[in-house]
Amino acid sequence: MEEHERRCKAAGRVTNVLCSSISDSGASTRGEVPISRAIATVVEGISFGEAPRWTHGALYLSDIHANRILRVDSPGGYEVVRRFDGPVSGLGWLPDGRMLVVSMHDRKVLRQETDGRFVVHGDLWNIATWDANDMVVAGDGTAYVGNFGFRISPTREEPKPAAIAKITPSGATSVAAAGLWFPNGMVISGDGRTLVVAESAARRLSAFDIAEDGILVNQRLWGQMAPHQLPDGICLDGEGAIWIASPPSKEVVRMREGGEIVERIALEQEAIACMLGGEDRRTLFMLTAERRDPEWCRHHHTARVLATRVEVPGAGLP
């Protein structure tokens, strides 16, 4: 069946945690001490990877401009989990194991039923002011979904603030927080009390307390990026630092709360998203793309999934 079509792409030699042979050279620094990391090409030849998630012993991601979800469970290969009629982005799972996926253009979150069908889980049309985008799902099944807020393609509008939507496990939707500038990648702390979101248009990370009813309160600056950087996808580690993919500077950086960058990994392509996974959650998966233009990406499948090993394991969600 097409939904379970198998594709294999050439990649460097990798171990069972998908990271051993060097295919790009990455250099990073912590303070004044340089760190050299081997970076493996896990998969190449995809359209535009986003929303990487490690679950059930495999890496899942959305190939946005190819309208599909991929599952990477072996070195150099991937499975097409499902194709859709339009672009999809954020991924997550309910406590009972059913998958959630953000359908971008129609501003909905879809839910996969036990028979494999996808149905509407939450309609965001009255909340999202442009394409729905990334998502994080809390331990109780509450989903938080960002959106662009304004058109960025094919012509770019003046930036406008946007809201993060909250969707309960039963599918009820409401505004969790408003006034954000392109709310993008999100993480939830291990204790479930704090959500951090990348505000791409403001080049910063903002933190919120998660109230008892799931609303996001007490907004505060978590970390500010430099003018040449931009936060896209993010992931949290066990020391409370956050790895941030920065497309324009072609790097993934590790930031501590307050804005101190303690490590940089330079890449050949634009860094779009990142995720800590593997059995010990110490494999840093990095999704990169040659360009971000949707039409170009649909015709040139040059995006990659890379991986490297790090010292501090992942924590929290996703």
Image (cartoon, rainbow, N blue to C red):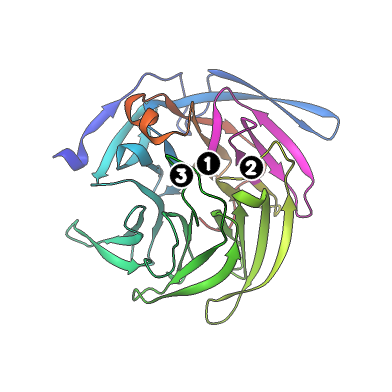
Which residue of the protein is positioned furthest toward the bottom in this rendering? 213
Q: What residue lies at 37% left-to-right and 41% top-to-bottom?
A: 64
Residue ID for mark 2: 230
Residue ID for mark 1: 273
Toward the viewer: 108 or 155? 155
Q: Earlier in the sequence, mark 2 or mark 1?
A: 2
Q: Are marks 3 and 1 in contact (CB under 8 Å)?
A: yes
The residue range painted magenta reads: 243-272
Q: Is residue 128 above or below residue 171?
A: above
Residue 207 appears in the picture as rendered: yes
Spot occupied by residue 262 in the image (x, y as percentages of width and height): 77, 40
Mark identifier at residue 52: 3
Spot occupied by residue 234 in the image (x, y as percentages of width and height): 58, 48
Query: For residue 99: magenta?
Result: no
Query: For residue 259: magenta?
Result: yes
Count all numbered tags in the image, as a single digit.
3
Q: Earlier in the sequence, mark 3 or mark 2?
A: 3
- Element type at marker 1? strand
